[in-house]
Image (cartoon, rainbow, N blue to C red):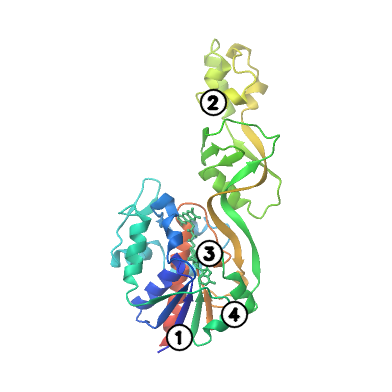
Amino acid sequence: MKKVAIVGAGPAGVYCALALRDMGVFDIDIYEKSSPLKTLLVTGGGRCNLTHFADNLKDFAKNYPRGEKFLYSIFSRHFVDDTLDFFKKIGIDTYMQSDDRYFPKSNSASDMRSKMLFALGDTKIINKNISSIKDLKNYDFIVISTGSKGGYKLAQEIGHTIVEPLPSLCGLKLSDDSPKFPQGVVLKTQDGEILFTKDGISGPYVYKISSLNARKKFPYEITIPLINPDDLFNEVKNNPKKSFGNVVCKYVPKSFAAALLGNYNKQCANISKKEIDELKSITFKVVSPDGRGEIVTCGGVNLSQVDNFCRSKLDNKVFFCGEVLDIDGFCGGYNLQNCWSSAYSVALKIKELCA
Ligand SMILES: Cc1cc2nc3c(=O)[nH]c(=O)nc-3n(C[C@H](O)[C@H](O)[C@H](O)COP(=O)(O)OP(=O)(O)OC[C@H]3O[C@@H](n4cnc5c(N)ncnc54)[C@H](O)[C@@H]3O)c2cc1C
C-alpha cells in the first residue's frame, strides 16, 4: 500500500483526500498546522460560494487572470457538475443563486466544513507544521496544498520557483488627489458595484479591477464608465427647468452626485455638451491595496514546473493543488473551483500510480 502525505487541510487538501478515498486510496495522512478547513469558514461571507455556473469550460476558465489555459485539462477531468455531484455524495446539497453562484443548501460554510471532515472517516489529520519536505521522507507521494501561506518554502526546497505573491480581490486605496465621495456610498456600474470606503474603493467591481491589475506597479489610474452621454443629453434636453443635479441623480446616487458636481444646482437649460461629456467616466489614482476583501494570492508555484496533473517536474513524488499554485480567479466561486478541480487531478494521478 502506497502512503500519501497531504500538507494543509484547507479546501484543496481535504478535497484531495476525499477524492483519493473515493478512488480506493486510503493510506493518507493530512498534516495541518492550524485547524482543518478553517479557511472555508469565512468564504462567501460564511455561506461558502463553492463554485459558479458554467456553460462551457473555456469560457469558465476566462475568469482566471492567472492560470486560464493551464486549467483546461484540469477542468476537463473534473468540472462544476462533477464537483456538485461529489458534494452531493457526501451529503452536501447545493443550489444556484440568481447571480449564478453556487452555495450549500444549508447556506452554512460551517455545516459544509463539518460534512467534509465527517466524510474523511478514519483519515488522520495530524496537527503539525511541516517545515521541510525531509520530514515526509517515509511517504510515497506528497501533496502540497498549503495555500499561499506556508508552502512556498517546501516547493523551493525541491527547486521550484515562486512567482512573486501579491494580493488580489482586495479593496484599493486612492491617492489624496483622487475624487472623494462619502464613505458608504455605493455606485452601481454595468460591471458591478463600487463601495466608497474611508480611504478608497471596494466591492465586487473593485475586486475585479484589483485582480486584473494585480501585477501592475502602483500608482496606476483606473477609469470607470459613469453615464452614457447620449442618454444624459436627452434627459437634460427634456427637462430644461430641472437642476442638473436632479437629472444626474437618475443615474447615480444623490450623495455621489452632490460630491461630484460643482454645477449641481445649475438649470439643465444652461448645461453645455462639455459638462455632459465630463460625466462619461471618472478616473481614480490607485496607490495600494487596502488589505481588506476576499484576498486571494496572485502568484505561487510556477506552472511551467508542474505537469498538467499538477505533478512536480522536479520531484515526481510531489504534487501541488489549490491556491499554492500560480492560479487565481475572480470572485464568484472560481477560487474554490480551482481547489476542487486541481485536487481531483492530483488524486487521479496518484490513484493511477498506486495501481
Ligand atoms: C474572506 C475570504 C472569503 C473568500 N470567499 C470565497 C468564496 O466564497 N468562494 C471562493 O471560491 N473563494 C473564496 N475565497 C478564496 C478561498 O478561500 C481560497 O482560494 C481557498 O481557501 C484556498 O484553499 P487552499 O486549500 O488552496 O488553501 P488554504 O485555504 O489557505 O488552506 C491551506 C491550509 O494549509 C495549512 N498549512 C499551510 N502551511 C502548512 C504547513 N507548512 N504545514 C501544515 N499545514 C500548513 C494552513 O493552515 C491551511 O489550513 C475567500 C477568501 C477569503 C480570504
Which secondary structure, mark 2?
Answer: helix
Name the residue: 60% across, 75% down.
155
Q: How far separated are the C-alphas under marks 2 and 3?
A: 39 Å
Q: How far separated are the C-alphas under marks 4 and 3?
A: 18 Å
Question: Which residue in the protein does label 3 denote?
Answer: 323
Q: What type is the residue that disc 3 sits on?
A: Glu
Q: What type is the residue that disc 2 sits on?
A: Ser
Question: Which residue in the protein does label 2 denote?
Answer: 255
Q: Nearer the viewer, mark 2 or mark 1?
A: 2
Residue 353, numbered label: 1
Q: Are marks 4 and 1 in contact (CB under 8 Å)?
A: no
Q: What type is the residue that disc 1 sits on?
A: Leu
Q: Are marks 4 and 2 in contact (CB under 8 Å)?
A: no
Give whichever of 152, 215 is nearer the camera: 152
Question: Which residue in the protein does label 4 denote?
Answer: 313
Res 276 quadrant in image: top right
Q: How far separated are the C-alphas under marks 4 and 2?
A: 56 Å
> Is the shortest distance between ligand 1 and the CB of mark 4 under 8 Å?
no
The image shows residue 24, relative to residue 153, as above or below, that is below
Q: Are marks 4 and 3 in contact (CB under 8 Å)?
A: no
Q: Earlier in the sequence, mark 3 or mark 1?
A: 3
